[in-house]
Image (cartoon, grey):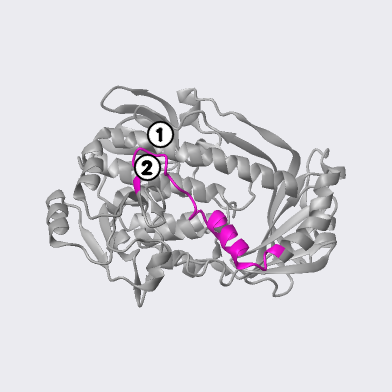
Amino acid sequence: MTDVLIIGAGPTGLVLALWLARQGISFRIVDQAAEPGQTSRAIVVQARTLEFYHQLGISDDVIKHGIKVENLFLRSKNKKKGLFSFKEFGLGLSPFPYILSFPQDDHEKLLIAHLKKHDVEVERNAELQSFTQNPNHVTAVIKTGDKVETIEAKYLCGCDGAKSATRHLLNIDFPGGTYNQIFFVADVETTELTHLHDIEVSLSGTDFCIVFPVRSSKHHRLIGLVPKDKENLTNITFEDVKPSVLATTDVSIKNLNWFSVYHVHHRVARVFAQNRIFLLGDAAHIHSPAGGQGMNTGIGDAINLAWKLVDVLQNKASANLLNTYEPERLSFAKILLRSTDQMFQFISARTKLGKFWRIVLAPNILVFIFKFNVVRRFFFRTLSQIKIKYRESSLSAGKAGKVQGGDRLPWIRMGDTDNFAPLQNLSWQIHVYGEATESFRSQANKSGIPVFTFPWQNNMAEYFEPNAVYLIRPDGYVSVACPKQNFEVINDMIQKFGL
């Protein structure tokens, strides 16, 4: 019997597998596809994902292979209307104060390469046929070619995409809808060096096209609306949308690498867990591409569940810890769905209001308000996902300074290091910004939770209270914030979940 069976080897399943591998958990990861994805579908890697990758020790490798986005150009009626600088977008808020462009096919290959360092291989052409559950384990039937295998696992994680077999077999509702418009995505090679570190958003009265840098200065990803007069075609090709692209953007196209059209869906599963089976990523929620949130949200699901599985499987916590996965991630997925839906409606609507937004508001109002630092910081916190909180979770309690239980641990730079360094331990820990008393250290040591102290410096006052104690989860979120060095408050949480 294996500890965990992961269905699906996209970014969500691969990140879940990496965390489990780092912690010595036995698992198998299977995927229906014969090979990793060959197209650059999801492309944006947000700062919060890079923070998780830093914990896993792979952030440097990801950044080396990606492209840091420095600017966003806004064009309206094929005229450059404004520039948003991303060079210092999140300066002081994250060790990764930028957006990274890294196409999903390359992303998956990199994650697979790191899994191989743990002697883990993705099992390909493997299709989930059925499963049964009992109080102790899951029994899954996997078909690989002509071979049918029964796998027993303590837990099963469905990371198998929007058409999830796991979700269908559980008979879990997937309410939501589909936008009427047809969208296209294309990877193209350009004739000249353009937009090496830039995103271009080109708007017109009826259409829009977003241009991302991919792989090199001459390769770009295009995402946009199929022209209305082409929507009823049986087989829409790039030649059908190319005139609109050339009229809207300043991209000069040499070759087409690949092209696809699709409808955008917006759905969230009714539940994310059923006994010993969990849904993650697109199997649990799908969103519009607005803001580059989808893949990053799936990776957030993986991290949230991974450390909880580790603690339960290694008898470091009681099984009720796993009950916190669904309320934490389902709540965020619903909030994200609403926000991306509203944003997407504004961007894509072919109504008079949509045209007004694209021609008047976006190129004028947005350019103006983005000049203010408070606006840029708000946008960064939101897009980067560092704003995600779990304050309503049963794992969260207390407040000290401006930090509440459930908040992401604020990032503080301290000379050549930062307060995120201990998070690479992937374990529970206590932070004190100031000094810890011997009495408190002694009590913490008995619990087995290490205490990290950080000499007080002025920039800490923006978030922390001097000498307060913060119990930090393995995923870098604050579980308990206590203004006094009272170990009983932390011990209450330890007892609650058998930590």
Q: Which mark is residue 305?
A: 2
Splitting the image into 4 quarters, where does residue 262 fall?
top right
Kind of residue at badge 1: Phe
Splitting the image into 4 quarters, where does residue 411 fall?
bottom left
| Separation of marks 2 and 1 at Cα, in angstroms | 9 Å
Which residues lie in the magenta part? 369-398
Please determine whether, in this image, residue 333 is positioned above or below residue 380: above
What residue is at 87 percent from the left and 44 percent from the top?
A: 229
Q: Which mark is residue 89?
A: none
Kind of residue at badge 2: Leu
What residue is at 82 percent from the left and 46 percent from the top?
A: 353
* Furthest residue in direction bottom, as rendered: 415
Q: Foreground: 285 or 13?
A: 285
Circle 1 residue: 278
| Residue 124 in sight here | yes
Q: Is residue 371 magenta?
A: yes
Q: Point out residue 18 in the picture as x, y percentages from the top left corner.
A: 36, 52
Split into 4 quadrants, where in the image is the N terminus?
A: top left
What residue is at 56 percent from the left and 54 percent from the top?
A: 382
* Furthest residue in direction front, as rendered: 484
User: Does 442 sit left or right of 410 as displayed?
Assistant: left
